[in-house]
Image (cartoon, coloured by chain):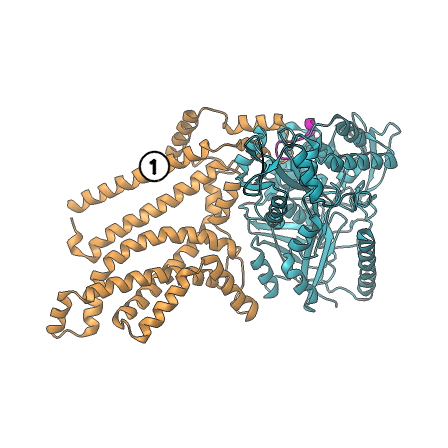
């Protein structure tokens, strides 16, 4: 069962990466100066109150003890309790997660759609006017900061034409502008990769052979070229999804959406360590699992990758 | 000149107010409908609408709480207090006992009757150290309350505590339902239950708060524009920290009200007939710079003076806020009881030549790059900051840097997350900090300047026995004239000794679609939606 061994190896690697991320975040946050108890107790709290809070939180204990108890509760499926609100971290993440996932998923779909369609068009019509137009558009979109693109979209579609809501989350209409913003920008990155990759494959000798055999250009492109061209693109798409997650954080702020972005910024400001650990754990798990799925997808796309 | 202009502006303001009220008196507001407000709540992931709790001192959420909770008394523009949930009160001759007669028709949103026991339960809750509530300093030396009869409660202090009535008028001591406290405990903030014109419906953590009209509301404060329930059925607060988005949401009609309109958009909203813009000073300890005077060379009053004389604060405030707010002369904002704003206006002028001669006399000579040097040490001010550019404060500091450089003083900005910030304050590892705090009473000076009452977050290293004595005395002084005098002296000293360099007087502002009527700003500078309606019938 070579596939099984491949899977186990990848899974073990994934667990190792996630464990490393947890440990790193734990250490970084505890080495930072500042007393979390003082922040939990808040503005105007007396030193006695701060001491009480510190006892409740257990932040006065030695580092190793805190790390050990964190891993122990993690092993029991417990992400800990938020310093700031006293709620379980998992429920705080859960409360903010759906809008972020929705935004990430819809943006990723748009990224793939725009990236692949425009990329293939660009490669096929290379150096013709269509390619040039697409390339200038992509250059424009990818060089613009995403928050700025977001503000421009709001000014045009909300303020000027009153077509779409400028902010908020919950409805499909409120999703359109943020998804457009992320989809256009990251779709631009993907388009460049697809264009490059498809161009390379189009120059491969086997394509000439296929043409010589009299296959239709459409069939060459979609049955043979795309399948080969997509492998490097999919690897890069895995990396792009990581960037998309950080883009989501920014875009959520611009469009005043509910989501993990708020949670992260808030938790950073108040040094809410358990929440930050929870979010990092979640984001790294998501990223690692996503890339694991991508690794596995090679097997489906290209039989040569079966090990 | 300054004060004449201010008087003229306030005269204009009152004329506009009278005209507006006269207009409103003829028109009958249309009941019903939903009002949406986009507010600057900063980027947070949760809301806590417990007025005594962690966010009780956090203005954006306290502004929302004002619609949910009522207070025992209401603050009037002349800084006196008038009846609200309390109909009258007597203060004992030794000023240690307050007896309140309460309204008998008030009901909490959960059906609990509002009475003397409920008031006592509120103060006892705040006093209990196990609850670790932020409103604790606001009840001062509170020792307990007695239920004299169902609607008479007697509040006792171990020594006179004059800020009490002012503090009662603010959301920090608003009255919460004791039944809800028993039921929800620490989760009261997610299940706010008061007696206010709107009751809590639902919230989405960090992004939205939905309130519904309290149909039985008959106990608006004495100075309210109308008695009886609110006009709109639903009131939605959306947290939109990004200012461009907040403005866009209002301009696109997605919301009807947006607050904290940035300076550069104010003129536009004022000129646009589709919107009504209003603003009011927040009762505040003004945003002020505080040098670390336990550290050389800032322990030398004359060097602090040289820093102050290098600054043209009029120019800074005019350039950054485009004339939308005024510069501050005193530590306390202009409208706050005891403010020395009028007394201190024009009390000093920028004088770079004098600043230079002071520094040169102290041995600080100009170095090759224009920054002064003494014994090989550069004259550098490290400004410790954690707030970022809220209220355009870092823009202010850029101009401060520019002006100080002209005197040969270098300013560096040390931006830190809250944790590092507190650590650096604790270690005294900074030269300059700056901040403001909203408050209904000048007692805020005691928490800022008297060491034993100061919390870490307020920072500062000042310990001046004379100032301490005045501020402690003032908190207990029963004669308002003498009390005010103590605060005037204290502020004079703070300015003379350069313990603080006040920069600007903050105004809270909001813009509303012109169809929206009756949104007002109370004496604290908090928005009141009780009288808001979506037009006239």
| Position of residue A77 measured from the top left corner of the image (x, y, whole percent) | 39, 36
Range drawn in magenta: B451-459
Q: What residue appears at the point 34 percent right and 36 percent down from the top-left corner?
A: A19
- The answer to whether residue B462 shows anywhere in this view is yes
Give whichever of A79, A16 is nearer the camera: A16
The prevailing secondary structure element of the residues shown in magenta is loop
Label 1 sits on a secondary structure element that is helix
Q: Chain of mark 1?
A: A
Count of numbered tags:
1
The local crowd at label 1, few if under 14, some if 14 to 19, many if 20 or more residues have their Cα within 10 Å, is some
Q: Left or right: A241 with respect to B77?
A: left
| Position of residue B197 measured from the top left corner of the image (x, y, whole percent) | 72, 51
Q: Left or right: B221 with respect to A107?
A: right
Q: What residue appears at the point 43 percent right and 37 percent down from the top-left corner?
A: A79
Q: Which residue is mark 1?
A: A20
Task: Indicate yes or no whether the magenta region holds residue B200.
Answer: no
Q: Quick one: which chain is cyan?
A: B
């Amino acid at each position: 069962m070579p596939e099984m061994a491949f899977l186990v190896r990848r899974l073990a690697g994934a667990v190792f990466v996630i464990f490393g991320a947890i440990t790193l975040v734990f250490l970084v946050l505890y080495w930072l100066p500042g007393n979390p108890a003082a922040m939990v107790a808040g503005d105007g709290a007396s030193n006695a109150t701060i001491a009480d809070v510190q006892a409740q939180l257990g932040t006065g204990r030695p580092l190793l003890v805190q790390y050990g108890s964190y891993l122990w509760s993690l092993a029991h499926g417990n992400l800990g309790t938020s310093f700031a609100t006293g709620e379980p971290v998992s429920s705080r993440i859960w409360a903010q997660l759906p809008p972020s996932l929705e935004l990430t998923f819809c943006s990723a779909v748009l990224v793939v759609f725009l990236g692949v369609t425009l990329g293939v068009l660009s490669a096929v019509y290379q150096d013709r006017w269509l390619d040039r137009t697409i390339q200038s558009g992509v250059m424009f979109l990818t060089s613009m900061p995403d928050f700025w693109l977001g503000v421009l979209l709001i000014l045009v579609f909300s303020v000027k034409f009153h077509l779409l809501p400028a902010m908020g989350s919950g409805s499909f209409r409120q999703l359109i502008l943020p998804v457009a913003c992320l989809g256009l920008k990251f779709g631009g990155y993907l388009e460049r990769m697809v264009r490059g990759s498809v161009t390379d494959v189009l120059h491969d000798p086997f394509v000439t052979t296929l043409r010589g055999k009299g296959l239709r250009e459409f069939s060459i492109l979609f049955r043979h070229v795309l399948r080969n061209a997509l492998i490097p693109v999919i690897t890069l798409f895995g990396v792009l999804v990581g960037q998309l997650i950080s883009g989501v954080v920014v875009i959520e702020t611009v469009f005043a959406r509910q989501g993990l972005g708020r949670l992260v910024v808030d938790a950073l400001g108040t040094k809410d360590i358990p929440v930050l650990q929870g979010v990092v754990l979640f984001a790294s798990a998501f990223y690692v699992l996503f890339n694991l799925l991508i690794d596995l997808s090679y097997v489906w796309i290209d039989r040569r990758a079966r090990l | 000149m300054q004060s004449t202009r201010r008087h003229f502006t306030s005269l204009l303001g009152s004329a506009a107010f009278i005209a507006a009220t006269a207009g409103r008196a003829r028109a009958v507001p249309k009941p019903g409908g939903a009002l949406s407000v986009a507010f600057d709540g900063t980027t947070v992931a949760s809301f806590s609408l417990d007025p005594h709790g962690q966010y009780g001192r956090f203005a954006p959420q306290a502004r929302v709480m004002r619609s949910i909770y009522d207070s025992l008394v209401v603050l009037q523009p002349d800084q006196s207090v008038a009846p609200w949930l309390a109909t009258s009160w007597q203060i004992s001759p030794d000023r240690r006992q307050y007896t309140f007669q309460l309204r008998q028709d008030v009901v909490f949103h959960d059906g609990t009757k509002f009475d003397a026991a409920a008031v006592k339960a509120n103060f006892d809750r705040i006093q209990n150290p196990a609850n670790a509530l932020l409103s604790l300093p606001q009840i001062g030396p509170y020792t307990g309350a007695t239920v004299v009869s169902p609607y008479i409660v007697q509040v006792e202090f171990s020594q006179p505590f004059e800020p009490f009535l002012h503090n009662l008028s603010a959301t920090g001591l608003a009255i919460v339902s004791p039944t809800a406290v028993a039921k929800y405990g620490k989760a009261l903030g997610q299940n706010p239950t008061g007696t206010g014109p709107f009751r809590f419906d639902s919230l989405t953590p960090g992004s939205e708060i939905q309130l519904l009209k309290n149909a039985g509301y008959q106990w608006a404060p004495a100075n309210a524009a109308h008695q009886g329930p609110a006009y709109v059925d639903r009131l939605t607060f959306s947290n939109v920290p990004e200012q461009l988005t907040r403005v866009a949401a209002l301009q696109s009609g997605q919301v009807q009200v947006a607050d904290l309109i940035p300076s550069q958009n104010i003129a536009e909203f004022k000129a646009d007939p589709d919107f009504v813009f209003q603003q009011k000073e927040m009762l505040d300890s003004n945003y002020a710079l505080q040098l670390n005077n336990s550290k050389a060379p800032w322990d030398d009053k004359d060097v602090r003076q040289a820093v102050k004389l290098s600054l043209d604060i009029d120019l800074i405030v005019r350039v950054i806020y485009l004339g939308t707010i005024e510069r501050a002369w005193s530590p306390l904002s202009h409208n706050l009881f005891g403010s020395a704003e009028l007394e201190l206006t024009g009390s000093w002028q920028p004088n770079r030549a004098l600043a230079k001669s002071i520094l040169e006399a102290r041995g600080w000579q100009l170095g090759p790059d224009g920054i002064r040097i003494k014994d090989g040490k550069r004259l550098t001010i490290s400004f410790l900051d954690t707030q970022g550019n809220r209220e355009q404060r870092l823009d202010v500091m850029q101009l401060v840097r520019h002006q100080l450089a002209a005197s040969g003083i270098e300013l560096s900005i040390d931006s830190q997350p809250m944790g590092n910030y507190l650590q650096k304050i604790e270690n005294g590892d900074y030269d300059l900090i700056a901040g403001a705090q909203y408050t209904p009473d000048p007692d805020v000076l005691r928490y800022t300047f008297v060491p034993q009452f100061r919390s870490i977050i307020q920072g500062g290293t000042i310990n001046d026995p004379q100032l301490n004595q005045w501020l402690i005395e003032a908190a207990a002084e029963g004669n308002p004239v003498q009390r005010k005098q103590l605060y005037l002296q204290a502020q004079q000293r703070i300015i003379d000794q350069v313990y603080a360099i006040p920069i600007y007087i903050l105004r809270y502002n909001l813009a509303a679609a012109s169809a929206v009527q009756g949104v007002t700003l109370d004496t604290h500078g908090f928005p009141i939606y009780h009288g808001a309606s979506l037009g006239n019938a």
